[in-house]
Image (cartoon, rainbow, N blue to C red):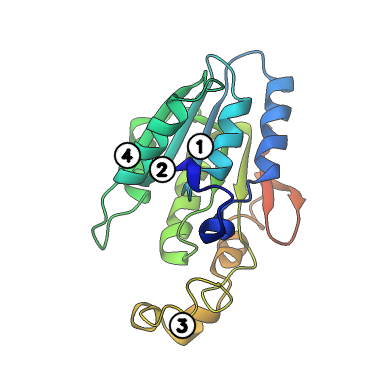
Amino acid sequence: MIEKIGTEEYRHFSSPSTEMVTCIEKLHRRNARPITVAEIGVGVGATSVEIVKRLRKGDSFHFFSFEDEVAELQSDLAAQDYCVCELVPHGNSRKAFDSYCWPLAKLCLENEGGSGIFDLAYLDGAHALSHDGLACVLLKKLIRKGGYLVLDDLNWSFANSEVQNPTVFPQIRSMYTDEQINALQVGMVARLFMNHDEDWKCARYTGRRAVYRYLPR
């Protein structure tokens, strides 16, 4: 999978999140203990590679996507000399109503009453409210106090996507209404579940991405 990074065909998926790198560095400065990072939606592994390069022995990296994708990414990352952290894949099937929300929900139930699992999570999934709204709610339950949640593509829509707009991908019209195709659905997730939650502070906003911190009070 990671051999696709930087190729012309996958240029839209080849830019890693610099916000994730910054958050990992902050967490390492703040914590003597190992940290746990999650990525929801792996693309071709561009951000995954940068995460793993910066995780230390004892740290853990959980990644969520389709079963075949996480299996391929796990194999690619494990073969790299820079990979010293624990790799924890979470795959879901390609059935119509299955998604990364299912393993996230199972983790929430397993951790019910606990103090969280992740120190940092990156939500870069389907970019649809129906998937990422639930994923955001679940991740908020899984992030430890003082931890971070990064939302990607706040200004993205199916209409302005170079690969999923109706002209390139006509099938999108059978999946979503015109209103949904034009909506900034990840931006809606931020407004609905993050921006007015007093337990979370927006630590950085770039227009494309927002970094939220779970206040340790």
**Sequence-wise first label, 3 or 1:** 1
**Residue 121 vs residue 96: left or right?**
right
In this view, the mark in front (1 or 4): 1
- Work out whether 18 lies above or below 119: below
Around disc 1, counting alpha carbons within 10 Å, would you say few (fewer than 14), some (14 to 19), or many (20 or more)? many
In this view, the mark in front (3 or 1): 3
How many numbered discs, if any? 4
Q: Which residue is tagged 2?
A: 64
**Sequence-wise first label, 1 or 4:** 1
**Sequence-wise first label, 4 or 3:** 4
In this view, the mark in front (2 or 3): 3
What amino acid type should be assigned to the residue bearing mark 2?
Phe
Q: Secondary structure at mark 3?
A: loop
Q: Which residue is tagged 3?
A: 166
Mark carried by residue 118:
none
Mark carried by residue 38:
1
Around disc 3, counting alpha carbons within 10 Å, would you say few (fewer than 14), some (14 to 19), or many (20 or more)? some
Give the Cα distance between marks 4 and 3. 34 Å
Mark carried by residue 106:
4
Quadrant of image for the N terminus: top left
Q: Say if residue 165 shows up in the picture.
A: yes
Q: Secondary structure at mark 1?
A: strand
- Work out whether 14 lies above or below 77: below
Residue 149 location (% of width, % of height): 60, 44
Give the Cα distance between marks 1 and 4. 15 Å
From the viewer's side, name the closer residue of 45 and 1: 1
- Work out whether 8 lies above or below 181: above
Dots 4, 3 in contact, CB < 8 A: no
